[in-house]
């Protein structure tokens, strides 16, 4: 158990809908990262937050947004969902950038 | 999009063999190199983070080296055991805090 929690574990929704994925980092970790793993691709970096502020953006679509709250938990919002958004979404946390990242169990999103 | 390449793609070794994998990454704007161990149906587990050229890290039978000037890192496993079977993933981060993952090396250790 990495200490990072993600909810929900599974999510099935229809195209055009909006969902929110939630992540609670390990106690003491200030950085949160979001990653997407699609069937035909490896892990793709989406976005990083550090102590509530956006630190870096990767291949995150405009339909996706994220935030980190004062209690350091983070939410990834995915809107206008498309079939291609079906993937495993991981959250990871670390003390700071360049430290080891601890991954949560992931949220499996299926868009039908 | 930057290319992080790992080789080989897959590897089958006998229990007790030592093995190594390669991760190649862009040498410009380097910030850190991460190695992860990823077992099927689990989440990636951090092995090492290396930031300095010439860094060497070790954890039990697993060790890693880093060459930032030429853009490569090696992961070594000494005396492979069946429980070492997993995918080994490397990730490069640059000075802009972007992370780029390789596609991994799948290791199977045959008892």
Image (spheres, coloured by chain):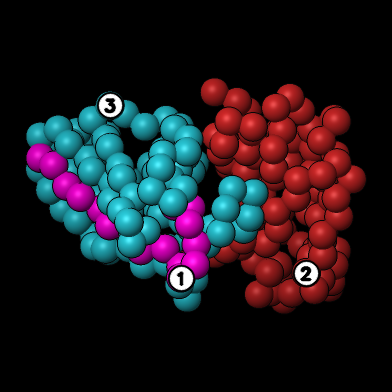
Chain colours: A cyan, B red
How crowded pointer 3 is (Cα within 10 Å; few <14, some 14-19, many 20+) is rated as few
Residue A92 position in % (x across, y down): 46, 56
Decide if residue A23 is on the left or right side of residue B15.
left
Is A63 or B81 nearer to us in this picture? A63
| Secondary structure beneath label 2 | strand
**Labels 1 and 2 share a subunit:** no
Is B89 or A51 nearer to us in this picture? A51
Mark 1 belongs to which subunit? A
- Pointer 1 residue: A27
Cα distance between the residues tagged 1 and 3: 30 Å
Mark 3 belongs to which subunit? A
- Pointer 3 residue: A62
Q: Given this view, does label 1 or label 3 mark the residue nearer the observer?
A: 1
In contact (CB < 8 Å): disc 1 and disc 2: no
Q: Which residues are magenta?
A: A17-32
Q: Quadrant of residue B78?
A: bottom right
**Labels 2 and 3 share a subunit:** no
Q: Given this view, does label 1 or label 2 mark the residue nearer the observer?
A: 1
Residue A83 position in % (x across, y down): 21, 36
The residue under the point 75% across, 50% down is: B50
Cα distance between the residues tagged 2 and 3: 40 Å
In the picture shown, does residue B64 fall above or below B111?
A: above
Mark 2 belongs to which subunit? B
Image quadrant containing the C terminus of chain A: top left
The residue under the point 27% across, 35% down is: A64
In the picture shown, does residue A73 fall above or below A52?
A: below
- Pointer 2 residue: B59
């Amino acid at each position: 158990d990495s200490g990072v929690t993600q909810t929900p574990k599974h999510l099935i929704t229809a195209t055009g809908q909006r969902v929110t994925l939630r992540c609670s980092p390990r106690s003491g970790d200030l950085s949160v990262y979001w990653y997407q793993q699609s069937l035909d691709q490896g892990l793709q970096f989406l976005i990083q937050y550090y102590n509530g502020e956006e630190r870096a953006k990767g291949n995150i679509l405009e339909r996706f947004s994220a935030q980190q709250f004062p209690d350091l938990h983070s939410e990834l919002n995915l809107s206008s969902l498309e079939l291609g958004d079906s993937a495993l979404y991981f959250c990871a946390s670390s003390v700071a950038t360049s430290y080891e990242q601890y991954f949560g169990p992931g949220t499996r999103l299926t868009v039908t | 999009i930057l290319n992080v390449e790992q080789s080989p793609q897959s590897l089958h070794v006998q229990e007790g063999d030592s093995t190594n994998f390669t991760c190649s990454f862009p040498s410009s704007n380097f910030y850190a190199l991460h190695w992860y161990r990823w077992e099927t149906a689990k989440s990636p587990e951090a092995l090492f983070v290396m930031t300095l050229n010439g860094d060497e890290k070790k954890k039990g039978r697993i060790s890693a080296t880093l060459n930032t000037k030429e853009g490569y890192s090696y992961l070594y496993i000494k005396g492979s055991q069946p429980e070492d079977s997993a995918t080994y993933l490397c990730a490069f981060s640059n000075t802009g805090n972007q992370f780029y993952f390789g596609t991994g090396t799948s290791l199977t250790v045959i008892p």
